[in-house]
Amino acid sequence: MRVVSLVPSLTEAVAVTVPGVLVGATDWCSHPADLDVTRIGGTKNPAVDRIVGLAPDLVIANEEENREPDLTALRAAGLRVLVTEVRDVPQAFRELSRVLDACGGPLRPDWLARAEEAWAEPPPADRRTAVVPIWRRPWMVLGRDTFAGDVLARLGVDHLHAGHPERYPRIPVAELRAAAPDLVVLPDEPYRFTADDGPEAFPDVPCALVSGRHLTWYGPSLAEAPQALGEALRAARR
């Protein structure tokens, strides 16, 4: 198999499960750290001609992270494109098995089995509300029907814009503060929120700085995400 991945989460999953099959990945595919493949541009602007030149048997993509015109161009060039859709944790497990099977790997490698076990615990009864910015200038937050929103819900955090008609709405920061959340969850990607960049906008609300990889990636990081995120969320109490 020769596989090109347009999704950082899937890149990591395939690389650690079926070593050697990846021949290309995006510039944003940072895991595994020693991944040595041809870089083909970003998730939103991949170099289609470079991908075609790699002659992959399969290109793996995601309906949210990648643009349909790029996927259409790859198909028009005669390439097989597998497009995933991930809106919650159970769907992530199903899609990961589908991708790994298509790449010639096992349906349920050890890391995936550990991840499924880690997420088998029922959600805690003690609930908190949150706003979850993913960008600033302008401020954007998690809205409806997102994988990260489902991850947080399973950890006892209900984000206040889950019913918004948009998946990633732009909300003025004054409106975010007026929503009076119990906490603000600030991931380090796609916008890199830090202790000095983000919490100052919410001076009277506890802020949880969390790993974007644990919050938004669906791959081997899922096995450690409940513990890593849980610790960060517990630390952000009044």
Image: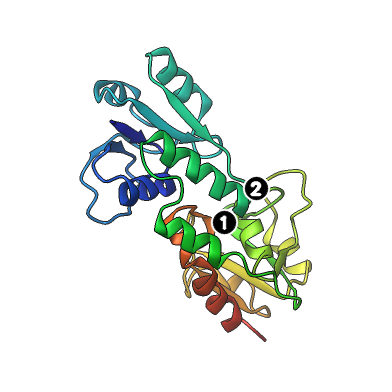
Q: How many marks?
A: 2
- Residue 192 appears anywhere in the view: no
Which three-letter amino acid code belongs to the residue tagged 2?
Tyr
Dot placed on the residue nearer the N-terminal end, 1 or 2: 1
Q: Position of residue 81 (x, y in %)?
A: 44, 26
Please indicate whether residue 110 sits to the left or right of residue 66 in the image: left
Q: Is 47 displayed left or right of 182 in the figure?
A: left
Q: Residue at x 74, y 56 (%)?
A: 161
Residue lying at the far bottom of the rendered structure: 238
Give the residue displayed 41% in from the left and 53% down from the top.
109
The span from disc 1 to disc 2 (Cα, nearest Å) is 8 Å
Q: Residue at x 69, y 64 (%)?
A: 153
Q: Position of residue 123 (x, y in %)?
A: 70, 69
Is residue 100 or residue 26 the one in the foreground?
A: 100
User: What colour scheme was applied to this rendering of the protein?
Assistant: rainbow
Residue 33's x, y, as percent?
26, 56
Mark 1: few/some/many CA within 10 Å (<14, 14-19, 20+): many
Q: Quadrant of the N terminus?
A: top left
Q: Which residue is mark 1?
A: 134
Residue drawn at x 46%, y 68% is 224
Asked if 106 appears above or below 203 in the picture, the reply is above
SS assignment at label 2: loop
Evaluate if marks 1 and 2 touch, with contact meaning CB atoms under 8 Å apart: yes
Q: Quadrant of residue 25?
A: top left
Residue type for callout 1: Ile
Work out whether residue 227 or residue 202 is closer to the camera in this orientation and state it.
227
Q: Which mark is residue 168?
A: 2
User: Is residue 147 something that shows in the picture?
Assistant: yes
